[in-house]
Image (spheres, rainbow, N blue to C red):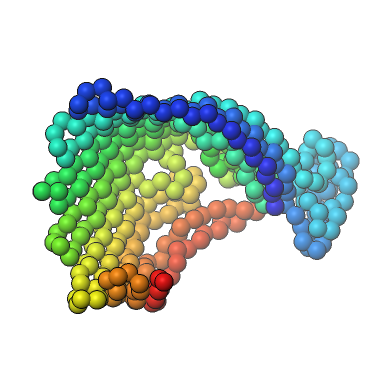
Amino acid sequence: MGEFETKTWSVFANADWQLTPDFSLTTCIRHTDGSQDYVGCSVEVNGSMQPNVNVFNRTYFSLIYATPPAAPLLENGCNTFDVATNSFGAVTSSTKEDNISWRAMGNWTPQDNLVLFASVTQGYKSAATPVNAASKSEQNAPATQESLLADELGVKASLFDQRMQANAALFYYDYEDKQLAAFFPDPICKALSRLQNIPTAEAYGLDAEVTYLISEELTAFGGLTLLHTEIGAFDTVDGFGLPVNRQGDPFLYSPETVASLALLYDRPVSADLGVRAWLSGRWQSESTAGTPDDALYDIDSYGLLNGSIGIYCLDDHWDISVWGKKRTDEYYWQQITSNANVILRFAGMQQTYGGSLTYRH
């Protein structure tokens, strides 16, 4: 459980500059000041954890840290242990931070239906406090704000008599103090998880999307993302509590390739009715939910296929459709986590079929 009280205020200014008939510049700046107070812990339920904590955990902590045994855990009390106070209780923290974020973006239109753009952005992600199933207070300690300097260079073009809209952008992200789930050493459990700040990290790649009007009834949508992520020098420990440097590791849940394709067929079939069909597919390459050298955290590549078909009233009062999701029936992981020396994998939704009826008054 965890309770948060967050206060934020900011001042923002924006200016658009038409420097030439073909070139415009947008600038903005924001000052943000915020604070967050947190109170939370792991709570035992109706005495279920009392025998384990009061008999074993108190003994372990007393022997490991050379202190008198902590006061016994009360029923429905916090079973998160704090070494500094030698007690089980709530974890509290308070963060107060400020930053100045800004952006500059230029748009050049050398000809009709073509825009070239470039931008530089300095942004921040506020401090974050995890709500873990924490056995020690350090697991719920806050991570400070992360900083991101983002560069982007791209194009937006209308082609083939505006039947195709193509957008593409190259990007480079430079992080400082990026927040990442990692481990810290523990003399009893070997390693415990918490949210930590990585000194440096980077990501770069390509993001592209295309919309093409094949005919008056049929439209195609395509997307492609190519991504490389990399952690800078970061001395920490692995899941066994052994020293490791994470330099060169990718970000969690960051596949290098994501591709999508969709088709929409939509046409009137009478003076009052229309038919609409939708087919979409998505594929992503392998990624990791932990240390890339540990196969237990591997997320294999997978693809999904969804579709629907239905009829609708042209005045938009109602529509009815049947649909199928994940028609490939592929078994895949969406998330992997670890807790108490157990690896937990969360599978994606199974193959699903259904129907929908919508009425708008």
Q: Residue at x 56, y 56 (%)?
A: 343
Q: Is residue 177 above or below residue 44?
A: above
| Nearer to me, 240 or 303 | 303
| Nearer to me, 28 or 296 | 28
Q: Residue at x 22, y 50 (%)?
A: 210
Residue 331 position by quadrant: bottom left
Could one spot residue 14 in this view of the protein?
yes
Q: Residue at x 27, y 38 (%)?
A: 169
Q: Residue at x 83, y 40 (%)?
A: 86
Position of residue 102 in the picture relative to residue 258 (left or right) = right
Q: Is residue 253 above or below residue 218?
A: above
Q: Residue 55: x percent and y percent? A: 84, 55
| Nearer to me, 269 or 170 | 269
Position of residue 207 in the picture relative to residue 15 (left or right) = left
Q: Is residue 304 above or below residue 232?
A: below
Could one spot residue 144 in this view of the protein?
no
**Residue farthest left in this picture:** 160
Q: Residue 209: x percent and y percent? A: 26, 48
Q: Residue 334: x percent and y percent? A: 46, 57
| Nearer to me, 300 or 208 | 208
Total marks in image: 0
Q: Is residue 293 above or below residue 343?
A: above
Q: Residue 177: x percent and y percent? A: 52, 30
Q: Quadrant of the C terminus?
A: bottom left
Position of residue 92 in the picture relative to residue 295 (left or right) = right
